Amino acid sequence: MRRVFFFLVLLALSISSPSIGDDGCERCHSGEGAKRLGLKDVYREIDSFRFQHPDVKKKCDECHVERRLKEASVKRLRAVSLDYLRDQVFLVEGLSPDREYLLEVKMVDRSGNRTSIPPSKVIPSKVKVLPYKDSIPPVIRDVEVEDLKQGVFIEATLRWETDEFSSSLVEYGLTPRLGERIGSERVFSLTHRVTIPGLARGKRYYCRITSRDLFGNVSVFEGVVIDTSKKVKGVKAFKGRDRVPPRAGKISLFRVEGSNDLYVRVSADEDVKATLFVTESVKMDEHGFGLLPPRKAQIDVCIRCHPQGVSHPVGIRSRSGSTVIPPDLPTIQGGVMTCITCHYPHGGNRRYFARMEMKRAICITCHIERK
């Protein structure tokens, strides 16, 4: 279904956007169109060549357009809750303030029943800003080692609570210097559970808990020790299966003053694990999904059909004073040689579309014997 959806979106975009190749490129890169835009008349140059690259006028996107991005028409961000909770907040960073995004939440309860919250559209800059700013760090309380699961390695669960929505991060190690960390700084809740896997038997692990609230205020709780030589009663495993799925929850959106980051609060009528999807449409312009960077267009595309073993090395700079690439030969990135340095890309009047005579002239142009 996903592939079908992507195909339909791409089809719609291809109908509404200028085509790539054929007449699409010729509008701007030949004749009056090129003159009006101040661009080189590429088609006129191609017509003047004695030899032309096959299909050079009809398959521009083969060498110039980022084809791999055509596989999808959306970008997707994903956030997952750490535990079964009735109320949690996801931090979504890196969104463009004025673009439209689609939010979708899927939930699963402890019995494995699934439900989802209907998708909603949002423009981050239009989301309300909280009318207050908190400067007081959250209070961390009721810290305990809730469970130790025995196996090849030990799996320990730390639990604590905070008096406001805060993140869950645990640093741990065999010495007070710690060294390892686990948890999430982008999921906020009032009840926190972090499971630490891969602990060795008969060891003492030092732990430090850090919780940050929505406004960036940080609290640290130190002195927690997990002793894997001791037994912990642990929480009772959930038994049975409720066949009734959870009722659809709800989401609310807000921002904090001075930030474009988006907070998404997910509430449900029972404990659930939630997954938040944030989708952004990717629209084509006259160059499809974007032009290839110079190195790809002038090296990688060429060697797909012309193996490096039978040609001059590319992707290199001059290595000695006796090798100088003259300024009239095109290079990239401060003098890096490409296939286009010695060959015209669309055609030419010499064999192999060479810019000059292949036997000698093209060699001594760069390789100069100095006394």
Image: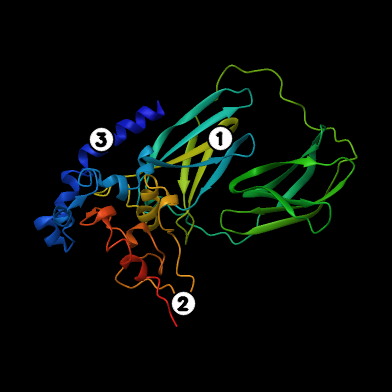
Question: How many residues crowd around disc 1 within 10 Å: few (fewer than 14), some, or many (20 or more)?
Answer: many
Q: Amino acid at mark 3?
A: Ala
Q: Which residue is mark 3?
A: 12
Q: Quadrant of residue 161 in the image? A: top right
Mark 3 secondary-structure assignment = helix
Q: Which mark identifies residue 322?
A: none
Question: How many residues crowd around disc 3 within 10 Å: few (fewer than 14), some, or many (20 or more)?
Answer: few
* Residue with the most extreme front position: 359
Q: Which residue is mark 1?
A: 274
Relative side of 345 to 90, left or right: left
Rendering coords of residue 43 (x, y %): 16, 53
Which callout, 1 or 2, points at the residue further toward the start of the chain?
1
CA gap between label 2 and label 3 equals 55 Å
CA gap between label 1 and label 2 equals 62 Å
Q: Amino acid at mark 1?
A: Ala
Mark 2 secondary-structure assignment = loop
In terms of depth relative to the viewer, which is nearer, 322 or 82? 322
